[in-house]
Image (cartoon, rainbow, N blue to C red):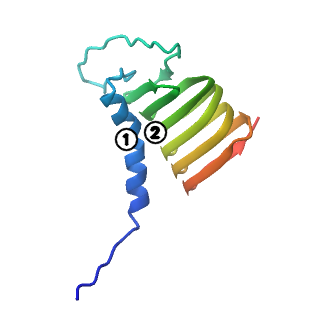
């Protein structure tokens, strides 16, 4: 009889990686435009993105990082690595953030927020319903609202601040 041994210790890490890449993959499949800056030393042509939803594109300050931002319905999907940006959640949009080492300021009032990745520092004006954080060592602060908080991961800090 064969013994069946399963090592489940890598499942949370694999899930975090999959969720980190999901908004970017969805954006590519939906034909999104990217607000990415090409890596240093590369040659790329860029085109201006047009959004019909009325939402402002994120304002970013990056140095050789890759960023993808797409809006599907009433949900903003933002994926990036090592970016400092301001994102407008407008009034009641949901926001999915994926990536690592980002410093984000989110203005407006988000309905729900989902953060996956590691070492993100995100400040929200307001979150209405729910904050879900999956990943490692993320610091999330919201000024207003009374959201339900789901902290799925390790070393995350989620606080109501001023």
Specify whether 152 is left or right of 130. left
- Answer yes or no: do the residues labelled 2 and 1 have beta carbons within 8 Å? yes
* Residue pointed to by mark 2: 98
Q: Which mark is residue 21?
A: 1
Q: Residue at x 49, y 44 (%)?
A: 116
Measure the C-alpha gap from mark 2 to mark 1. 7 Å
The image quadrant that residue 125 belongs to is top right
Tag 1 or tag 2, which sits nearer the N-term? 1
Return the x and y of residue 4 as percentages of the image width and height: 29, 79
Q: Is residue 132 above or below residue 90?
A: below
Choose between 136 and 7: the one closer to the eye. 7
Query: What residue is rendered at 41% in x and 43% in y?
Result: 20
Coordinates of residue 19 in the picture (x, y in percent): 42, 45
Q: SS of the residue at dot 2?
A: strand
The quadrant of the picture occupied by the N terminus is bottom left
What x and y, as percent, mark residue 9?
41, 67
């Amino acid at each position: 009889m064969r013994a069946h041994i399963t090592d489940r210790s890598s499942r949370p890490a694999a899930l975090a990686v999959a969720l980190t890449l999901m908004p970017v993959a969805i954006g590519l499949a939906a034909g999104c435009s990217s607000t990415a800056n090409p890596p240093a030393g590369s040659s790329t042509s860029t085109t201006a993105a047009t959004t019909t939803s009325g939402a402002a594109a994120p304002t970013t300050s990056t140095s050789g990082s890759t960023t993808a931002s797409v809006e599907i319905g009433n949900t903003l999907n933002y994926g990036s690595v090592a970016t400092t940006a301001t994102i407008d959640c407008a009034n009641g949009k949901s926001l999915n953030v994926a990536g690592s080492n980002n410093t984000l300021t989110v203005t407006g009032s988000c309905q729900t927020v989902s953060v996956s990745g590691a070492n993100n520092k995100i400040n929200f004006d307001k979150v209405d319903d729910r904050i879900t954080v999956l990943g490692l060592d993320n610091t999330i602060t919201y000024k207003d609202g009374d959201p339900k908080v789901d902290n799925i991961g390790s070393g995350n800090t989620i606080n109501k601040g001023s």
